[in-house]
Image (tube, rainbow, N blue to C red):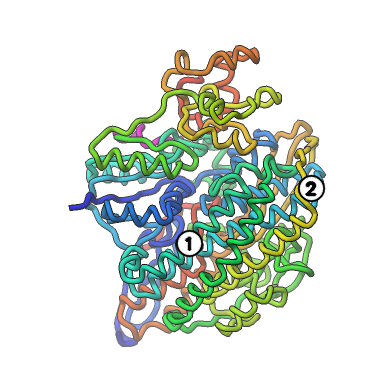
Amino acid sequence: MKPKVAFFDFAGCEGDQLQVVNLEEQLLDLLGQVDVVEFREAMSDRSNEYDIAFVEGSITRQGDEDRLKEIRANAAVLVAIGACATIGGLNAMKNLQDLEDVKRCVYGEAAKHIDTYPTRPVDAVVKVDAYVHGCPIDREEFLEVVKSLLLGKKPEIPNHPVCVECKAAENVCVYEDGQFCMGPVTRAGCKACCVTQGSICWGCRGFVDDPNTDAQKEILEKYGLDLKDVMNKFRLYTACSEIGK
Amino acid sequence: MSQSASVSFKVEHLTRVEGHGNIVVDVKEGKVTQCRWEVPEAPRFFEAMVRGRMWHELHHITSRICGICSISHTLASVKATEAAMGVQISDQTAILRRLAMHAEGLQSHVLHLGYLVLPDLMGVGSVIPLAASHPDEVKTVIRLHRLANEMSEMICGRTTHPQRLVPGGFTRLPSVKELETLKERLTAAVPDLQAVADLVQSRAGNFPPFERDTEYIALVAEDEYPFYDGLLGSTDGGPWPVADYRQVINEYVVPHSTAKHAKHNRDSYMVGALARFNLNSQRLLPLAAKLAGAFGLRAGNCNSFMNNVAQLVECAQAVEDSIGLIDETLAIGLKAEKPSVEPRAGKGASAVEAPRGILFHDYEYDGDGRCLSANFVVPTNQNHGNIQRDLEALLPTLLERPEKEIELAMEMLVRAYDPCISCSTHMLKVTFER
């Protein structure tokens, strides 16, 4: 029998589930290997019986936490997909401000009705078995993770900084251009796609496991930066991380 | 069921839409006591989160408001920043941005029609069973969807959350060869588009007959069917400069709703493909105009289910206009241009036509280019009031039908709006009376 998989979402833009749809013809191949039993964005069927749960989005309310725990209890394997789920994502930028002020800024006098708490990644609430990082996720990486899980293997996630892939892509270092970039401290796996397109690394895949040993410190030293400065300067995706504080 | 019977249901977390919405219906002895569109989406507070961020970060952050229309949010963002800082862009940038909008519009509409709406027309729960029962049709939909995504990649550097679109222009350009190939592929896609149109037309009888007069708001322009730029237009007045949007779009909170609503001249208005069509149909290119004609869609249509057909018409418009834009680009020649912005204090508002309707971004910056405040008015929030009133108008016409059919028709009505609920940055939680 084919393994049953289900997709769920919390606070986020649903851009990661969209990448699954964006697999195009490959999605049909995937559907030959698994039985999708719930995927609210794309199908009406629902089920509480599934082997693998893919969870997108970050957790920002008690009610969501309860729903996530139910999903965890139902699933043999739980996979966090996308930056909001894996590291809290941009949603966690609100954690850097006073929460009451954040609510008032957007909702004015109606702020008292707003139900929200500081943004948390999925693994702050339940055990996560595998991660597909990125904002959005890379479709090929998603397929690789699914293949590993179907073979009963633990998916391999890179633990070297984006700089390694950026050099391989033969990009000119953006620091050369006087710009700031999260590449030296950010987990690779994206093939440095943003720098390759003329942008910078924004840090969406989160920090490497131990920046003290794993970061690309030579690059930082070359430009007179230290690890802590870099990790604190540009807190877009990493506000949930303890490391840079 | 008979007029005197009772029906009560709640469609919790409506499927095949972006984000979370509920439909609550309660009819007692033929009398409607509850009919409500609820939105329990988790709020994300983008307007607060961007305070204090630099001008060159805003488009990156705000693109994450929506996974499906991230190009629209990015372009609304860079346009607002450019307006605030007095940045001029080149003709080349304006043309390439129009191509980016078409790529996203085509992707989003094909996703909606092919993956989310078609199952309703074919009487199934998702596209998955159709892959077995109608493999050729599904493959045609996938081919069109892939073309649109690859077009986004070619113009914007990525399919979702683009990287090349920045204030002042583009960080990278597509090559001449890529544009030539794209033109060939778009030309070759016309038969695929026709096949999807034929399929929808063969099942269009499954859209319930429905009419409710309402106001339609969209960008308008004298020389094009606008997506990227224009004036703020309405079937009830205008046009007005986009900078005056706060005088036209009145956002308000209602106690029985989860979302901020918006109105202008009446209780509610509609934005999106049908609104654009009703205001700009005379400026459609021949292929799109022909398709509209085949469905009998004419300006002044007030059947919200026809938003689906208007999206189909816009797919043809996107393909045909893109071919012309590529010709224009190749004729003037692609030039490398470095985006240049001198940060300065100022305020700026912008609007683009996202796939689901008109989208506003509005920023204030200090002299260092740090964001002091931001306001976003997204399409789906503008539609919530109109969805509610449509549901109220549709429900009494359905009461003779079995409950399952009532439920499906109500779901199809909401789905026709192609709501993008995650976008809705102004969600309010309220307690409902049961």
Residue linked to disc 2: B89
- Image position, residue B241 (x, y; %): 78, 60
- Whether A121 is among the magenta residues is yes
Residue linked to disc 1: B143
The reply, left or right, for residue A113 in relation to residue A128 is right
Front residue of B353 and B373: B353
Crowd around label 2: few <14 · some 14–19 · many ≥20 (10 Å): some
The reply, left or right, for residue B350 in relation to residue B357 is right
Q: Which mark, residue B327?
A: none
User: What predominant SS class does the magenta segment belong to?
Assistant: loop
The residue sitting at 39% across, 53% down in the picture is A26
Front residue of A239 and B156: B156
User: In the rendered picture of this protein, how many numbered marks are placed on residues?
Assistant: 2
Front residue of B251 and A55: A55
Crowd around label 1: few <14 · some 14–19 · many ≥20 (10 Å): some
- Which quadrant of the view contains residue B290? bottom right
User: What span is colored magenta in the figure?
Assistant: A118-127
The residue sitting at 41% across, 46% down in the picture is A10
Q: Can you see residue B270?
A: no
Chain under label 2? Answer: B
- Which quadrant of the view contains residue B385? bottom right
- Whether B31 is among the magenta residues is no
Quadrant (top left/top right/bottom left/bottom right) for the C terminus of chain B: bottom left
- The disc labelled 1 sits on which kind of residue? Arg
Chain under label 1? Answer: B
- The disc labelled 2 sits on which kind of residue? Ile
Sequence-wise first label, 1 or 2 = 2
In the image, residue A146 sits, relative to residue B134, either above or below, namely above
Q: Can you see residue B416?
A: yes
